[in-house]
Structures are given as C-alpha cells and as structure tokens.
Image: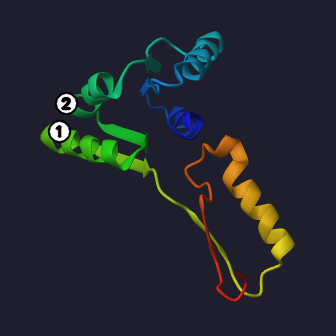
Amino acid sequence: MMMWKLGSLLATGCTTVLKTSEKTPITALMIAQLIKEAGFPPGVVNVLSGYGPDCGNAIASHPDVDKVAFTGSSAVGHEIVKASGASNLKRVTLELGGKSPLIICEDADLDQAVEVAHIGLFLNHGQCCCASSRILIDAKIH
C-alpha cells in the first residue's frame, strides 16, 4: 500500500515524509534504503517511524505539509481531517477501513463464487483495504 502512494508522488516529482505503521516499520525502512542506493537525492523520501498520536499528528497538523494521504481506520481518518482543518486546511486523501462485500447472486456459478470468495478475503493475507470480508448471498441459494 505504501508503494501505491510512493510511486505516484515520485513519478510526479514530489518529496515526501513517509510515516510508517508502528506495527510494520521494517518494510518502509528497507524501501528507504533501496531508494538511497538507487541514488535519489537526500530529502526526497523521508521516513518517520513512531506512534500515530505523536508522529502522525505532527504531520497532519504541520503548516508546511501540503497534503496527507492515509490508509487506516475511520477513527484516525477523522483525527487527520480535524488536524488539517485546524492547521492549514491541507488536502487529505483517506482510504479508510471498511467492509467490502462480495455479493453472490442467484444465478452465480457457485464453484467460481467459492474460489473468488477465498481469494477476495485471503489475498495479501487479508491485509487489503478491498478484501471481501463480508459475503452477501441471495436467499434462494442459502
């Protein structure tokens, strides 16, 4: 998910402060090392590790930050929007936790539906914002 944001902003010539998840900081730090080895100038990609209430809030409320992109919980998304409004009304893009339903209609191929349901939930170990974590099945099937 980090790469979705990082790739597009680097391709458009932007710099970034990347705040890692406090639960999974190693991946971002390894990517930062690869960026350094690739020859990116210092200051283009800056990695900040720490807890959201401290580090994340500092980013969301800093007047020199022009945009925040966040993937995570709805509760944290609300806090980011509040901090943005209280500082410089920075632009905010949020991808918030949700329950993406898989709808299985009456005329569905049930063998294929079972396969899709399995892949839809467990792709990327279930750590996907579009994981089909709810299944809605037509009453005529079940």
Residue found at x 83% / y 78%: 109
The type of residue carrying mark 2 is Pro
| Residue 32, quarter of picture | top right
Looking at the rendered image, the quarter that the N terminus falls into is: top right
Q: Which is more toward the observer, 117 or 55? A: 117
Asked if residue 44 lies left or right of residue 65, the reply is right
The type of residue carrying mark 1 is Asn
Residue found at x 59% / y 58%: 133
Asked if residue 113 lies left or right of residue 130, the reply is right
Percent x, y for residue 117? 73, 62
Are there few (<14), some (14-19), or many (20+) residues within 10 Å of tag 1?
Answer: some
Are there few (<14), some (14-19), or many (20+) residues within 10 Å of tag 2?
Answer: some
Which residue appears farthest toward the left when viewing the image? Answer: 86
Q: As displayed, is residue 62 above or below residue 130?
A: above
| Residue 24, quarter of picture | top right
Q: Which is more toward the observer, 73 or 6? A: 73
Secondary structure at badge 2 equals loop
Residue found at x 55% / y 22%: 28
Q: Earlier in the sequence, mark 2 or mark 1?
A: 2
Secondary structure at badge 1 equals loop
Q: Which residue is mark 1?
A: 88
Mark 2 vs 1: CB contact within 8 A? yes
- The tag on residue 63 is 2
Structural distance between the alpha carbons of marks 2 and 1: 5 Å
